[in-house]
Image (cartoon, rainbow, N blue to C red):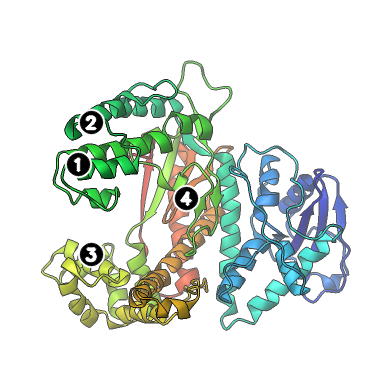
Amino acid sequence: MRIAVVADGDGGGWLRELGEGAGPVRPRRVDDLAAAVREIERAGPVTAVSDPAPDQRESSSAPVRWVWADTCDVYPDLVRAGVRVARCHDVALTEALLLGYAARHSEPRSLGAAWARLRDLPVPDDPVRPLGEGTAAQPALFEADRSTLPPGTDRLAALVEVHDDQRRRVAALPEPGRMALLAAVESAGALAAVEMGHDGLPWRPDVHDRVLTEILGPRPRPGERPTVLADLVTRIGEVVGHDVNPDSPAQVLRAMAWVGHPVASTRSWVLEGVDHPLVPLLLRYKELARLYSANGWSWLETWVRELPGADPGGPRLGRFHPDYVVGGVVSGRWATRGGGALQIPRSVRRAVRADPGWVLVRADAGQLEPRVLAAVSGDNALASAAAEEDLYARLAVHVGDDRERAKIGLLAAMYGQTSGDAAPLLATLRRLYPRALEYVDAAARTGEGGGIVRSWLGRTSPAPHDWSATVAAADGDRRRRAHGRFTRNFAVQATAAEWALVLLAALRQELPPLPEGGGIVFFVHDEVVAHVPRELAEETVRAIDRAEVRTRETLFGDTPVRFPLSVSVTDCYADR
């Protein structure tokens, strides 16, 4: 059963049940939207929203799926009110997928934009979402309308109209079941993103402060550098012979020229190619300056909130509340609007610690992309190797029992590297795994010709802008090859992102009931972290195992390829 939801900005809203082949169904106004959603979610699909005739109702055995314009506009307030839902259909995310499938990635995806396209009206731009939105920092009650619909438009009717159109567009695709699954797990990811942003990742502010002090020195006064950075600045000046501000790329370039090693860029990989005593100092400064700016004391105060009512004599307990952007990268991987949740430095991970009496249960998919390639390409030989716990060890028997060489060769084949240490291995791999190598080679050829490729479920790579101009450019060959490498990578990376999304969606359903503060608290690429009471750790591990099986079967059916998860139960995220 599907129920369309529109909030009115005053805590209430409108609900309308959507039935297959149903005639007109009366919407229902509720004064307390959160309470109404909670009641229906708890009671299950037997609860009628608008009491249509019996022959107009979907099967009552189907779980409730909430249909709304944008999860970020509705779900944060439901979560703050203590309401969690199992499933939804996010119109904006689905619209983005369908537009991408039609090679129209740059077009607006909001409800108002989709509705305008249906009516051949001017299409409004998507709204700009403020930094930090979707986290617990936002005020209660549902936000004002950001659907970009014209004033006075019946938002519920527009939502139903666009949703019906999306379902028709999905049904018209060559493989509608795959796109329907992609829209479902993308929407499930949006639910999880809001929940994780609200619940937060367990964080120890005192440990974070101690880590920064160990690495950088005591917290400096405003406008000053930490002592370790200040000392590096002094040593850099001594080597060069005059003061240099290492935060200034222009001054660093001049300093390198001054010491007799001019470089074209201050990027780390460029500097690493220079043999001079100045280089290690500059690289160390860059590393620590990034830690200071990206995860220093200001970050700690901005993004981590201490829990109220903590034991004064106990540890300081806090939560990091990231703001995820589902599908923020063209491959389907997530991004963030701030806080850098997807790039927590290894040193800072020591501050990610479970609450007393709780543990972190981590599940990390190893060798994911090569296994995905084995599954999608239908290469039986590679699939046989991927049935093993260590895929690279199985490949190593063909390259002198050198596991590292086998890994380099396969990754090079996937990512289009044809020179260096990888070159001698490619011929062997092409002989051993012809279908797998042809799969990525074909994707590369498509990209070099200006075409698009699709993931397993139908996420589509962006078409290159003005391909005729690209081909005609002086460096046209280089640009074509670059786009070929992009499509080669996209075909596998986007499917790997789908695997991770399906795992996340399955784990939301498989986890045992948990007290407040428990559940999935972190998700990055191919890793999921749950925060659970210690006595539920083993049950959580079993839930992860079930979720992995469901993910494999949902995506690839009866495949010999295995996707083993490295599961660990720890008190600290830095521990393995």
Mark earlier in primary sequence (3, 2):
2
Foreground mark, 3 or 2, reads 2
Kindly report the distance in space between the C-alpha atoms of the residues bearing marks 2 and 4. 46 Å
Residue 523, numbered label: 4
Contact between labelled residues 1 and 2, with CB atoms less than 8 Å apart: yes
> Which of the 4 quarters of the picture holds residue 117?
bottom right
Rendering coords of residue 12 (x, y %): 82, 47
Mark 3 lies on residue: 407
Q: Which amino acid, mark 1? A: Trp
Kindly report the distance in space between the C-alpha atoms of the residues bearing marks 2 and 1. 10 Å
Give the total of numbered labels.
4
Give the structural element (helix, strand or loop) at label 1.
Answer: helix
**Mark 4 Cα-neighbour bin, 10 Å: few <14, some 14–19, many ≥20:** many
Give the structural element (helix, strand or loop) at label 3.
Answer: helix
Give the structural element (helix, strand or loop) at label 4.
Answer: strand
Give the structural element (helix, strand or loop) at label 2.
Answer: loop
Name the residue located 39 percent from the left edge and 70 percent from the top edge: 486
Rendering coords of residue 288 (x, y %): 32, 35
Q: Is residue 329 above or below residue 292?
A: below
Kindly report the distance in space between the C-alpha atoms of the residues bearing marks 3 and 1. 41 Å
Q: Which amino acid, mark 3? A: Lys
Kindly report the distance in space between the C-alpha atoms of the residues bearing marks 3 and 4. 25 Å
